[in-house]
Structures are given as C-alpha cells and as structure tokens.
Amino acid sequence: MRTISLSIIVRRAVLSCTVLACGIPLVSLSRAKWGEVGHRLTAQAAAAALPSDMPAFFRNAAPQLAYLNPEPDRWRSRQEQDRDPALGVSSAADHFIDTEMIPADRRSNAFAARTRNAYADTLRALGVNAEVAGFLPFRILELTQTLRIEFGLWRSAPDAKTREWIEARIINDAGILGHYVADGSNPAHTSVQFNGWVGANPHGYATDKRFHSRFESTYVQAELTLEDVQPLVGSTARVFPELRPAILSYLNETFSEVEHLYQLDKAAPFDAGTTSAEDKQFTAARLAAGSRMLRDLWWTAWITSGDSASPR
C-alpha cells in the first residue's frame, strides 16, 4: 500500500506543488484537467441532445451550462490558495476515484455506503484513506440529488418570481454537476495510473508526468471539436430508476479503458501534433460518454422530480 501523505491527497489537483511553511501544498493553476475545451464540449453536446420536453429555461441555458462545466477547476485560484488552502485541499478528492485502491471484493460494499462519510469509514477499516482514493461517485450522486430537489421546488413554486430564482439555482448546480460527470469520462480520473504509469510496467507505457495534461488538455484543445463529439452522443435520453448503480456503471466503464488509453499513447503519443485516427476516435468516444451521461442525469433529475406535464 502506498504511503499516505497530504501531498498525495492533493496530487490530482497539482502538477507541481509549492509548500507553505506549515507543510500544506498549494494547488497550481496548471493542474491537469479535461481543460476548458474538453469540459465545454461535454456540456455543449449534452445540452444539444436534450429531449424537447426538458423545460425551456433549461434548454435555453446551454451556453451557460457550457461555461459552468469547467467552474470547479476555476475555484483553484492561486491567489486564494495563498490566502488559505482549505478549499483546494478539501475539494480535490471530489474529482477522481482511484478504483484500484479499493479491493475488488470490497468495492460493492464501499460504494453502497449511505453517505460519503460512511464510505470514508468503510475505507478506513480497510486501511485506505478516502481522501486519497477519491469521492467522485458521491460527488456526482449528491449533485444529481440536489438538482432533482430543485426541479421539484420549481414545479411547486408559488409565483413567477420564485420560479425565476429557482431556475438560477438549477442552472448553476446542473453546470457544476457537469464538471464531475466530465471528469468521470476520463480514464485517468478513475485510476492510480492518472499521470504516467506507476508500478510494474512490462509493456513500457508512458511514465512522464505530462501524460495527464498531454491527453486531456493539449491534445483535446488541438484536435477535438463539437462536430467530433456530438454524433456519438445519441438522441435517446435514459431515465435511471436508481442513480447509484448508473453512476457506478459509468465510472466502471471508464476505468475499463485505462490500459487502452496507455496503449494508444504508446502507439501515437497524445500531444498537440498527434494525427492518429485511433487517438481521435477514442477521445471523441470518451467525451461523448460524458455528454451522454450528463444529459441522462439532467433528464433523470427532471423526470423523477414529479409530473413532467407541469408548466414550463
């Protein structure tokens, strides 16, 4: 088992750390992520694939939903970290789940925990620090539940002004939800192999510490457009009878692509000048998986919040 330290806890949030005198690492603005382009593409494609029965105010907010998708990464302000690192450190683990850290025969029980705190207790009993393993499934679940509650409040709003206030809340939280769903479509957010292969490496996969950013930021910005992603999303929105199994299935699917990602990178390294058709097909499919899941979670939150015939 890896030694647990505070720098490991925030490793997802940084490519490099500056350490304060108190020993708490700061979060760098250069933190590897899908980047503005990947996050915006995920939200744009999700919004474009919404059913026409989605409330008009929500469908009309597509540009705002796209703007908000990268928002949790913007919260990692270097200036704010200099003032106090609490936000960056405490929220870092919401962006990933290191699946291999949880023994395979214990994962079902861990993810069945009633709350994120109970999940942390379950992992602690296994000798695993939940802040190191990550909270991504619970972050997606919690925000989707929040959105469903808000749609219910919108349906029963007593007047137009109140409904307008609730709409602002819905758009904001739907946009923030989108960020974590997008993170969950990237294999590097579901594995300890998040930034170069670690441990036994018989196949000679990349070990450089630019791997994460090369793939999801540099390459996506250079090579991917909405036209690459949108056709792969599909037009049929799903309503999930239960959120938790759907979220876990989504993240497990992403996790199953970790080695494939490294295989592609070995054949044609992801970077700004990469022209491999296989690299582009894989990346577009991953972004589309995020868009499809986000569209379906938005739709599920709306449909399961009450009577879909309520005024729009």
Image (spheres, grey):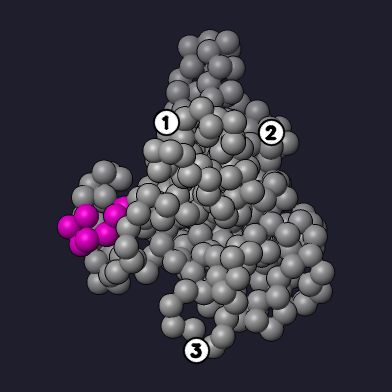
Q: Amino acid at mark 2?
A: Gln
On the rendered structure, is 294 left or right of 22?
A: right
For marks 3 and 1 on the same chain, the one whose residue lies earlier in the sequence:
1
Residue at 47% x, 74% y is 198
Q: Secondary structure at mark 2?
A: helix
Can residue 309 be seen here? The reply is: no
Q: Quadrant of residue 311?
A: top right
Local crowd size for mark 3, using a 10 Å CA cut-off: few (<14), some (14–19), many (≥20): few
Rendered view: 110 above or below 17? below
Identify which residue is drawn at 53% across, 49% down: 17
Q: Nearer the viewer, mark 2 or mark 1?
A: 2
Q: Is residue 126 magenta?
A: yes
Give the distance between the C-alpha atoms of the residues marked 2 and 3, in whole angstroms.
45 Å
Mark 2 vs 3: CB contact within 8 A? no
Image disc number at residue 231? none
- Residue 152, can we see it? yes
Is the residue 259 above or below the residue 120 in the image? below
- CA separation, marks 3 and 1? 49 Å
> Which mark is on residue 64?
2
Q: Which residue is mark 3?
A: 202
Please tell me whether residue 226 is drawn above or below residue 139 in the rendered image.
Answer: below
- Mark 2 or mark 3, which is nearer to you? 3
Residue 249 location (% of width, % of height): 43, 63
Residue type at tag 1: Ile
Image coordinates of residue 65 in percent, x first then y, are 65, 37
Provide the secondary structure element on which disc 3 rests: loop
Task: Determine whether the residue tagged by mark 1 lies in a helix, strand or loop.
Answer: helix
The one of 123 and 50 positioned closer to us in this rendering: 123
Q: Residue 177 at what x, y percent from top left? A: 52, 41
Residue highlighted by disc 1: 149
Residue extent of the magenta highlight: 124-130
